[in-house]
Amino acid sequence: MKSNRINTTIIVILFFTVFNLSAGNIEFGIYGGLSIPTADFADDNIYEDKAGFALKGFGLGIEMNKPLNSSSLYWSSSVSFLINSYNTDEIEDYYRDDLQYYPNVYKCKVDAGFWGNIPLLTGIKFQTKISPTLEFFGLGQIGINIVNHPDLDIELDFGDYYGYYYEVRSTINFDSATTFAFMVGGGVSLNKKLNISFKYFGLGKAELKGESNSENKSYIDGEIAFIDTYENDIEKDQSISIFLLSLGFNF
């Protein structure tokens, strides 16, 4: 996991370096707003392998625009940081249903981190005036996306009719992955400074690989009866798509 974060940092640095070394007048902008997962990424059906359990979150980004020969066209590049919470409620309900035949359920808890997506994109931006102070713009970009799946921690404590008490502790960790990505969007700009935009990010299908670790303890009369440990490699293909509604500022 650490090496993946280092690789991500290197890619971001190279992205900005290459863009800044390209001579010409470059306009910078920042944006932030609501990140809305869609389709499979937002699916929370635990019985579907395609479900991403992503909830609404937030997105931040930097955009760099270089005017082309046409006054309306720009070479546009961006890097966005899209963060979405993970829906643990459905997973907890699944375990509660599984434990419903045990007389005593003391704990059923699932903790999760966040989905993180970092699309690094480049393409074309079109901008035209619709009034002296207001401009409409549209853009399309392609590039790569760096995906980070949230880690999961599962804690189950329960007892049966025979006096046994059980503790289950499981963790699920995924490595980051890289996918092909695109973005299309549009918006309006006020006085070339403030802008409101609506962007759709198609972030491809990530081939995620990770591992699950579980330790199960059984007690009788307060004493440990036995301990079982399990470790498994896991794989998951996850399609990712996000709408970003954002407010931006151009420098």
Image: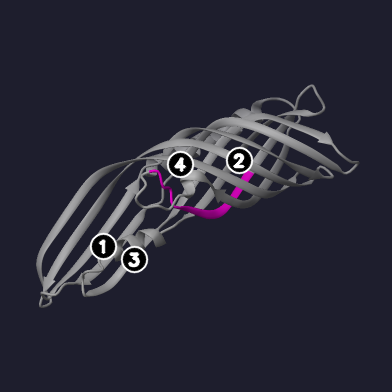
Residue underneath mark 2: 200
- Tell me the CA gap for discs 2 and 1: 38 Å
| Identity, as a three-letter code, of the amino acid under mark 3 | Lys
| Identity, as a three-letter code, of the amino acid under mark 4 | Val
The range drawn in magenta is: 50-61
Residue underneath mark 1: 98
Q: Which mark is residue 147?
A: 4
Quarter residue 169 falls in: bottom left
In the rendered image, the residue lying farthest to the bottom is 221
Looking at the picture, how far across and down is residue 106, in whole percent? 27, 74
Dot 2 crowding, Cα within 10 Å, few <14, some 14–19, many 20+? many
First in residue order: circle 3 vs circle 4: 3
Q: Nearer the viewer, mark 3 or mark 4?
A: 3
Residue 12 horizontal side relative to residue 125, left or right: left
Q: Nearer the viewer, mark 4 or mark 2?
A: 2
Residue underneath mark 3: 109
In the rendered image, the residue lying farthest to the top is 69
First in residue order: circle 4 vs circle 2: 4
The C terminus: image quadrant:
top right
